[in-house]
Amino acid sequence: MYLRASEVGDSSVADIDRSLVRSLPLFANMADVELERMLARAAMRRIPPGEAVFEQGQKATQFFLLLHGRLKVTQVTAEGQQIIVRVVHPGDLFGFAQALQRDDYPGTPIAAAESVVICWPNEVWASIVEQNPNLAVNAMRTIGQRLQEAHTRIREMSTEEVERRVAHAVLRLMDQAGRRDADGDGVHIDFPLTRQDVAEMTGTTLHTVSRLFSAWESQGIVKGGRQKLLIRDRARLEALAEGQ
Amino acid sequence: MYLRASEVGDSSVADIDRSLVRSLPLFANMADVELERMLARAAMRRIPPGEAVFEQGQKATQFFLLLHGRLKVTQVTAEGQQIIVRVVHPGDLFGFAQALQRDDYPGTPIAAAESVVICWPNEVWASIVEQNPNLAVNAMRTIGQRLQEAHTRIREMSTEEVERRVAHAVLRLMDQAGRRDADGDGVHIDFPLTRQDVAEMTGTTLHTVSRLFSAWESQGIVKGGRQKLLIRDRARLEALAEGQ
DNA sequence: GCCGTTCCTTGCGCTCCCGCAAGGAACATG
DNA sequence: CATGTTCCTTGCGGGAGCGCAAGGAACGGC
């Protein structure tokens, strides 16, 4: 049944995995009845890799929650330069334009791996918050954390050289999407990640990232691969991030 | 009476300028009674230039609103490098640590000019939000906007060269703190602003900022001065910000 | 299995910008 | 007015990292 729905791309409320949703911090203090009422107004969508959930600049009519998979949120500048604003992990809200007080989406979330999202029309937000202020508080915390991450990134970009910034970015990815490697030693990043991606996260070029990874690999700190990254020596990486 | 209170540094609720507070978007939808109740739990403080409202890392027990003046929020890295995270303008909330889900303040707000703030103990927040969800929504929007600004800055730092970044920063300051100059031509920044400050906002050095300002001055775009900046040709500055 | 596409690597030259250094101007303080 | 402090300016040299370029490796589609 799930598979059939997936083929269509859209799917009914009944298919949404309750236990998964229930475990999210966002809904921690929400009563079962409330949650059910909220899910009743939701829709589910499957996003194949490389596809966008919505496009930057598009009118914001819905907000979203990532259930499975991984999204890279990109922004494109007037000159066509692209950057990755953040990575959306399972359980994260995104496409939250109205909270940012704008009526269009500021970025484009692209599926790095096969992903499943649920979405609500914008109007749902207000009506739900009214009955459940706790959700608003939770959402605010989420945005607050995101703000903190942004400030961290600004600080790093202002004061650190490229190697440290890249090391920090890799450590962050490791914490958010690390997975113990099947082949024994090390932790790998759990979704396809190109050198270009890392460059766009750290404000550098894919060339520099490639050179760094090569250098690190020769020291046994990481092991690269096409769209893959395996971290073998976290301590050394942390040392690099702190500037030796 | 106001002056006497100022001398002490702390002041009573009665002194708070109601019409000023009333006009803030944050309280737009709040009933007079609610506002009065909220102000009843507030305290007022005067901050002389150069002094901090609180220190980075300090336990967060209060949140704040800037009434008059101007604050530069700085963060110091482990290596002692300083950056300016943002500038607080009159009407802005700050010291909002609990919304960021942390119990210490992430930065240090330093008065650039003589400033007046009002502050509340953290507990007030929860009790007020409960009775007035609208305030939570407003606060979330504020944080959302701040997040957007942070992303803009990240994008600029990733993709633009120093000159464009500095031009953008100056334009932003102009919009937020610009004031028609008394001596006729141009708009000046309404608080003391050093080259070092601008450097810390844009992730460069005071040397580079100084060189840029000199170059711009020789083209008649701006006019510098000790802790002063006068913008004479906004159009040219915008052109620079867009990359000629 | 072949071919096209995407992704990665590495060398080389160049440029933007930092860091050092030294001097000068504005302002505060007694 | 004298002295110290903060802030600004400018020259010079060096280096981190970008951009170009060219080649190679992994993957997917037919």
Image (spheres, coloured by chain):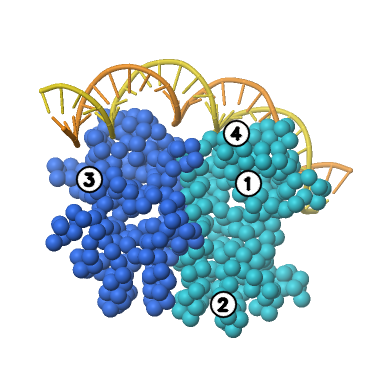
Chain colours: A cyan, B blue, C orange, D yellow
Q: How far apart are marks 1 and 4 (CA)?
A: 15 Å
Is label 3 or label 2 in front? 2
Q: Which of marks 2 and 4 is nearer the N terminus?
A: 2
What residue is rendered at 44% in x and 38% in y?
Answer: B81
What residue is rendered at 21% in x and 55% in y?
Answer: B8
Q: Distance between the residues labelled 3 and 2?
A: 51 Å
Q: Distance between the residues labelled 2 and 4?
A: 46 Å
What residue is rendered at 52% in x and 52% in y?
Answer: A149
Mark 1 and mark 4 in contact? Answer it, CB < 8 Å.
Answer: no
- Which amino acid does the dot numbered 2 rest on? Met
Q: Do labels 1 and 2 share a chain?
A: yes
Q: Quadrant of residue B138?
A: bottom left
In the rendered image, is residue B163 in sight?
A: yes
The residue wearing badge 1 is: A171
The residue wearing badge 3 is: B187
Q: Distance between the residues labelled 1 and 2?
A: 33 Å
* Mark 2 Cα-neighbour bin, 10 Å: few <14, some 14–19, many ≥20: some
Q: In which quarter of the image is residue C19?
A: top left
Q: Do labels 1 and 4 share a chain?
A: yes
Is label 4 or label 3 in front? 4
Mark 1 and mark 3 in contact? Answer it, CB < 8 Å.
Answer: no
Q: Distance between the residues labelled 4 and 3?
A: 46 Å
> Subunit of mark 4?
A
Secondary structure beneath disc 3? strand
The residue wearing badge 2 is: A30
Q: Do labels 4 and 3 share a chain?
A: no
Mark 4 and mark 3 in contact? Answer it, CB < 8 Å.
Answer: no
In this picture, residue D9 sits left or right of residue D25? left
What residue is rendered at 33% in x and 43% in y?
Answer: B170
User: Residue A151 location in percent, x, y?
Assistant: 47, 50
The residue wearing badge 4 is: A244
Indicate the quadrant containing the C terminus of chain B: top left, top right, bottom left or bottom right. Answer: top left
